[in-house]
Image (cartoon, rainbow, N blue to C red):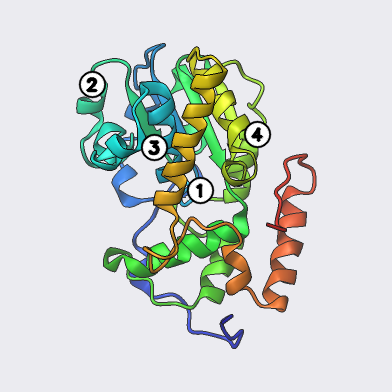
Amino acid sequence: MAESEAETPSTPIEFESKYFEYNGVRLPPFCRGKMEEIANFSLRNSDIWIVTYPKSGTSLLQEVVYLVSQGVDPDEIGLMNIDEQLPVLEYPQPGLDIIQELTSPRLIKSHLPYRFLPTAMHNGESKVIYMARNPKDLVVSYYQFHRSLRTMSYRGTFQEFCRRFMNDKLGYGSWFEHVQEFWEHRMDSNVLFLKYEDMYKDLATLVEQLARFLGVSCDKAQLESMVESCHQLIEQCCNPETLSICRGRVGLWKDIFTVSMNEKFDAVYKQKMGKSDLTFDFSL
């Protein structure tokens, strides 16, 4: 059931205090004081990075990347804490010093915009996998995430949250700039640009792209086995029968957007993405 579009109270002041601005971009408070250190973070050619705007399918992508790069089966991944295997660069734990000393090959995640990532990455070091997601599904998932976290103190409506998203007032800054920055670097030799929806539309091609990009050699039978294992992972991660809220579902936005909200969103999307040839399939 879509929410009412009646005017709602503004977001609580304490929600605003969760962010700080760095070079005009809103970032989570734990990034404060470490941006220069992040820029100077030392990379290795064997590093594999996963970069996304929040709620772009990071959890599912990391499992697929881990499966393809490490050759493990989905049942084994299900018994592991993948988050411990792939730390987030800017998070307080485990911290930059510990990530720096991890044994190779390091698998590292980040939600930071391209411009704030380690300078060495801009110079072609390490492999970077970027995933973008249909922004309408993303904003619904991001809203549900904020509502589920007591630490975020978000008590506004979806309408208000969506307005904040369209006006670039959420953590990690503008989604529109985030995806377009990486899209502009999609031809860089160390960057692979993927779309979340392709895991559902054409998983075989996506897995093949990943394997080629990561230098994983496999014959047709091995590739087919890998694709089947990735299918199992997706089913485990996005099974509506076992999850009360499936934030990873494609087409999530259709359950909550009103016609009016959709028109407003489309207008903002056209204004901010009109000059880009990056497109998303909203019909799924």
Q: Looking at the image, is mark 2 or mark 4 earlier in the sequence?
A: 2
| Mark found first going from the N terminus, 3 or 4 | 3
In this figure, which residue is indicated by the disc labeled 1? 56
- Pick whichever, 123 or 239, lies toward us: 239
Label 2 environment density (alpha carbons within 10 Å; few <14, some 14–19, many ≥20)? few
Q: Which is more N-terminal, label 4 or label 1?
A: 1
Question: Label 1, label 4: how many angstroms apart (C-alpha)?
Answer: 15 Å
N-terminal label among 1 and 2: 1
Q: Nearer the viewer, mark 2 or mark 3?
A: 3
The amino acid sitting under disc 4 is: Trp
Q: Secondary structure at mark 3?
A: helix
Between tags 3 and 4, which lies in front?
3
> How far across and how far down the image is residue 201, in percent?
64, 44
Q: How far, Cα to Cα, is label 2 from label 4? A: 29 Å
Q: Are marks 2 and 4 in contact (CB under 8 Å)?
A: no
3 or 1: tag closer to the N-terminus? 1
Q: Which mark is residue 63?
A: 3
Look at the image and tell me whether residue 36 can be seen.
no
In what element is the residue under mark 1? loop
Measured as percent of width and height from the top left, residue 224 is found at 53, 27
The alpha-carbon separation of the residues under discs 3 and 4 comes to 23 Å
Q: In this orientation, which residue lies closer to the viewer: 48 or 53?
A: 48
284 is higher (above) or lower (below) than 125: below
Instruction: Tell me: 71 left or right of 134.
Output: left
**At 33% across and 34% down in the image, what residue appears?**
89
The quadrant the C terminus occupies is: bottom right
| Closer to viewer: mark 1 or mark 4 | 1
Residue of label 2? 102
Q: Position of residue 256 (x, y in %)?
A: 58, 74
Q: Amino acid at mark 2?
A: Leu
Task: Please name whichever residue, 92 or 80, is drawn nearer the observer in this view of the structure.
Answer: 80
Tell me the amino acid under the disc marked 1. Ser
